[in-house]
Amino acid sequence: MEVKLWNDKREREMYENFAELYAIIKATEKLEKAYIRDIVSSNEYEAECQKLIAHFKTLASTLKDTVPSIERFADTYKMDCPAALNRLVTVGVPATVEHRAAAAASTASSAAIVAECVQHFITAMDTLKLEFKAVDQVYPLLSDLLGSLNKLSILPPDFEGKTKMKEWISRLSKMGAADELTDQQARQLHFDLDSSYNSFMAALPNAGT
C-alpha cells in the first residue's frame, strides 16, 4: 500500500521545500568542511557558498511561517550541521568574505591608532616647546601616548618609545603635581620624544613608500 506524505498540492510543495532546505544545509556543511581541509580553493568555495546562501535565504523566507526556526528544523531532523548553521543563519556570508571584512576592520582600526599616536607625540613635543613643564601638564600627555602605543599590536613590547615613556612616567609619578621639570629634563624629554617618534614612524609597515 502506497503511503502519501501529503494530502494536497500545498502540502506536497511544503515537503518538497523541506527536502530542499535539508539538502542546502547538508551541502553547506560539506562545503565548510572541504574549505577548512583545503579540498576546495578559496574562489571555488566562495562562489559555491554564495549560491547556497542565496538559495537558503530565498527558501527560508518562503518557509518563514512553517519553519520559524532553522535551528529547530535541524534539530527535528537530527541534522548535525553546526558549521552550516553558523554560515547560513549566524554569519550569512562566505568565510572568505567574513575574513576580508575582519582584515579591513583591523587595518582601519590600526590606522586610527597610528593617527592617535602621532597626535599624542606632536602634542607632547609642542607642549614642551611652549615651555609647559609642570608635572600635571606633562604627565597626562605621556600617559595618553603610552596608552596608544600599547594598543598598537605591530609594535614589539620592548619598542623604544614604550620603554622611554614608561621611564618618564615612573619619574614624574614620584614628583608633586605642581613640580616642574628643569630645563635640562625638559630638553632630554623632548629629545626622547623626538627619537621615539622617528623610531615609531620607521616601525610602521611600508614606511617611506
Image (cartoon, rainbow, N blue to C red):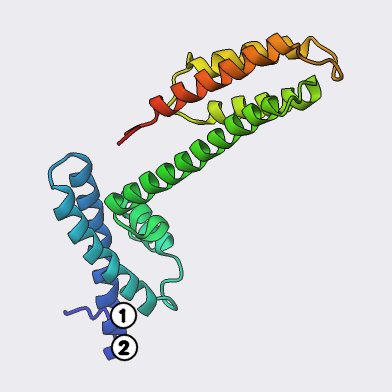
Q: Amino acid at mark 2?
A: Arg
Residue name at image x 31 percent, y 84 percent:
11
Determine which quarter of the picture holds residue 176: top right
Determine which quarter of the picture holds residue 145: top right
Which residue lies under the disc numbered 2? Answer: 10
Give the x, y percent position of residue 206.
32, 34
Give the x, y percent position of residue 25.
28, 60
Residue 8 visible to the viewer: no
Q: Is residue 183 above or below residue 197?
A: above
- Discs 1, 2 touching: Cβ within 8 Å: yes
Residue name at image x 54 percent, y 22 percent:
194
* Quadrant showing the C terminus: top left
Which residue occupies the foreground of this view, 65 or 201?
Answer: 201
Which residue lies under the disc numbered 1? Answer: 14
Determine crowd level at label 1: few under 14, some 14-19, many 20+ residues with C-alpha closer than 10 A.
some
Q: Amino acid at mark 1?
A: Met
Residue 140 visible to the viewer: yes
Task: Name the element at disc 1.
Answer: helix
Q: Is residue 195 left or right of residue 39?
A: right
